[in-house]
Image (cartoon, rainbow, N blue to C red):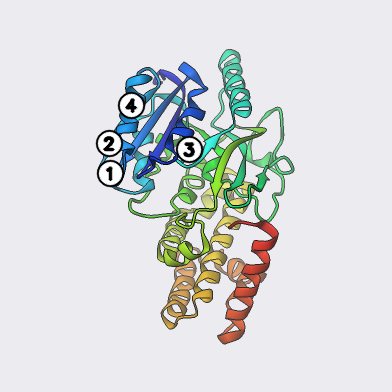
Amino acid sequence: MKKFEKLITFTVPCYNSEAYMRHCIDSILVGGDDVEILIVDDGSTKDRTGEIADEYEKKYPNICRAIHQENGGHGAGVNQGIKNAKGKYFKVVDSDDWVDEDAYKKILKQLHQFEKDGTDIDLMIANYVYEKVNTGEQRIIDFSKGLPQHKVFGWEEMGKFGPNEFFVMHTLIYKTQILWDSRVVLPEHTFYVDSIFATMPLPYVKKIYYMNVNFYRYFVGRDDQSVNAKMLLKRIDQYMYVTQLICEQFDHKKTVEISPKLAEYIFRLIRILSLISTVHLRISGTAENEQKRKDFWKMVKKNQPELYPRIRTYWGCQLANYKGHTGRFVAVRGYQIANKIFKFN
């Protein structure tokens, strides 16, 4: 088995990130020589992103590495990190986000304890916090109700999650070998690929540890962010493409053999991705997107014929797929209500 040089690799994909990347990298540097930070300059042309990456490598040669590549999008940056990682564990931190120092130190301490005890885990999960730039509001997403604490566990010990509780890239610290074994490769020039990263390696995971600490700080509120409603609508084809890839790659029967609870979790994810796609297509109100909605559901039926009835008859999907103006009205109002409750934009 390969001997790793670092405890954990952090990959920071950067594209024209001069305005905020220093805050991100500085927050990770707290880990000292335990970590390596791969600063991936994804073909930045409008600012000093590449120069800043080189500055950090020069100043912290034992911690930071600058990687320059042609522009390939967020997925290409993550792929580059997975390929070049020298840490036993792997974490992605987007260049406009950061990590909490106290939670970070607790995570490193726990990973060191695992090394000392000879305990091997495949995945560590921690909480993340929505940091809303416009209002200063914070919202914590934690998994304390659904995951055991203070123990290594498997998928069958996982409990129930809330309707907005899903594993996203921000929550996950994979063992690097798991990513290599799963051969996960994210599409280039595509947004929303974090859903693939947070889903497709999971069947390879057997041993999990959850830390109830608010580790990842997710910066929300810029108009150009992919999670912004207007941007998601603009990029709905890419969102549907990511959903299609997950539908195509998810082997429900095989996953049930690994863990029925994991299979059910991934099913729930596909269901919510399908609902989000449908709602945004209905919000647009165009004839073109109405046809895309019909084609989208044909795709789901083709790739997941056994799960399709359960997905399509889910109450949210049923309401969003009502015909004509009624369906569009329900989709728009449903989205507005959900946004007020869960505050995802």
Single out the mark in the foreground, 4 or 1. Answer: 4
Q: Nearer the viewer, mark 2 or mark 4?
A: 4
Q: Which amino acid, mark 3? A: Val
Horizontal placement of 183 versus 294: left or right? Answer: left
Q: Which of 239/23 is in front? A: 23
- Answer with mark 2 or mark 1, whichever residue precedes in sequence: 1
From what the image shows, is residue 181 above or below residue 285? above
Identify residue type, mark 2: His
137 or 256, nearer to the observer: 137
Q: Which residue is mark 1?
A: 43
Q: Which residue lies under the disc numbered 2?
A: 68
Q: Name the residue carrying label 3.
A: 93
Q: Looking at the image, which residue sits at the far right? A: 145
Q: Residue at x 52, y 22 (%)?
A: 30
- At 63% from the left edge and 72% from the top edge, which residue is drawn? 313
> Label for residue 273?
none
Q: Secondary structure at mark 4?
A: helix
- Secondary element under disc 2, as helix, strand or loop, is strand
Q: Which mark is residue 55?
A: 4
Can you tell which quarter of the image residue 273 is in? bottom right
